[in-house]
Amino acid sequence: MSVQAVKDVEQGFVERFEAGAPPCLCFLHIQKTGGTSITKAFMPLFDQNRVICHAERAPARLEGLDFLAGHLSFNDIEGLAGGRIYMTCLRQPTQRLVSLYRFWRSVKCEKVFGADLGHIASAKSRSFSEFIMCDNSDLLEVTDNHLVRWLTPVNGPVTEELYSQACANLERFDIILLQETLKEDIEEIFTKLGARDFISIPEENVTDTNCLKNPDRFESAEAVEACSDPEFERILFERTHFDARLYDFAKTLRIRRSAARRPLPRLPLKLLRLPQGQRISSRGGDFAGLLGPGWTPRFEDLFWTEEDRALLRFGVDWRSLCEGVVRLEIVPCMILGRRRLDMVLQVEGGERRSVVFLEDGLQMSAREIGGDVDDICIGDRSFIFDLALPKDCDAWGEYRVNFEIGPRVAPVSLGHNNDDRKLGVRLVSVQALSRSEASILRHGPW
């Protein structure tokens, strides 16, 4: 497939979601590919009343969600309604089998549901080579080219035709992750979603951690990997041959898609809604939920811009229909030696404000400042800015305020402590007001 052909596919992907309700992110979880960590990383982004993390246990609840994850096969989701973004994660096949075997040997049977009980018994009673070479039909479902079987219905041996169908089905997934590059993959997706500062990738169901807790339940990693019997090697090749090709196909497909630079459609991410009139302070526990890309990680409740651009995103609980204002309390990073800092605030679909911060005591003429400036602020104290919101928010109930900051500077470069972050401004509080409330609070009652 040429790069242009991939771009055509990607354009069709975006057009699927240009109108109508925001799509549901649907994660198909293959065992021992990092799926539990992926699920726990994405779940906090969504309204918890509209997510499900074990969809295979509640097949009747697969509609009307913002995020669903589970041990579902491609066959399980093929008949679902449209408007979904499909995501999955693959792992190098032999490594996945080793991890699966060692995990099943460690697990307590009373904590397991369904068919895995028989597989666990097989792992506990066999060495790794015996486990792989076992020709029990139930066990072959998970040891014989499981990735291909998961992507296309297979009755009996996997064939070249079924492998080709699995590749075609994999191409229908919108997001393909790899366990070996999982952290980088998730960071890229969160950045595309405008949720980079919400990244938390917990390590869950890690087989090696279970090994340390229960060493007597495991065949050692060295013993698992040291099997050198020719017959075992032949069987292992047969069990992973098509999966290895599918894994290589996935890596090639990811490279082609990366060249096409596909954007992600907007998802219904959880919004921090501002109660009308209530001031939300950075000292509050939910404040970080306002921040999109461009902010420093949370540190002692001090949220600074650390890039040339930063994003604030929120919803508003209006008590009545009225023209709205968002009030931002901002402190510039005017450390000794920094003479000037420029900032532009732009509400998407609303007001734009250009601000210049100057060092305390610095005198500059309008000509020296230059440009079309709305406000000139002196010193490093807190400043209040009111920005008019558009009468209607976007289709997702979301308002966005974009920050443009420059020139940024790191305190360490000016001889202040060892902080090497390139800081711009600090956001202290946010408040949603009607225009009349904003006027009274700023000027006092008549």
Image: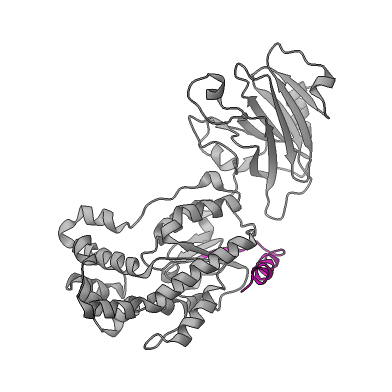
Residue at x-position 74% and y-position 41%: 347
Where's residue 203, x and y in %?
37, 52
- The answer to whether 343 is drawn above or below residue 271 in the figure is above
In magenta, the rendered stretch is 1-26
- The answer to whether 314 is drawn above or below residue 109 in the figure is above
Residue at x-position 19% and y-position 76%: 229
Q: Is residue 212 left or right of residue 272?
A: left
Q: Which of 226/14 is in front?
A: 226
Q: Number of callouts in the render?
A: 0
Reply yes or no: does residue 171 show up in magenta.
Answer: no
Residue at x-position 78% and y-position 25%: 375
Whether residue 129 appears in this view of the structure is: yes
Where's residue 56, x and y in %?
43, 71
Where's residue 184, x and y in %?
48, 52
- The answer to whether 235 is drawn above or below residue 427 in the figure is below
Whether residue 46 appears in this view of the structure is: no
Quadrant of residue 401 within the rendered picture: top right
Where's residue 52, x and y in %?
47, 62
Q: Is residue 176 left or right of residue 131?
A: right
Q: Quadrant of the N terminus?
A: bottom right
Q: Quadrant of the C terminus?
A: top right
Residue at x-position 48% and y-position 62%: 177
The scheme the figure's colours follow is one colour
Farthest left residue in view = 216
Q: Which of 178/324 is in front?
A: 178
Q: Which of 123/244 is in front?
A: 244
Q: Is residue 353 left or right of residue 17?
A: right
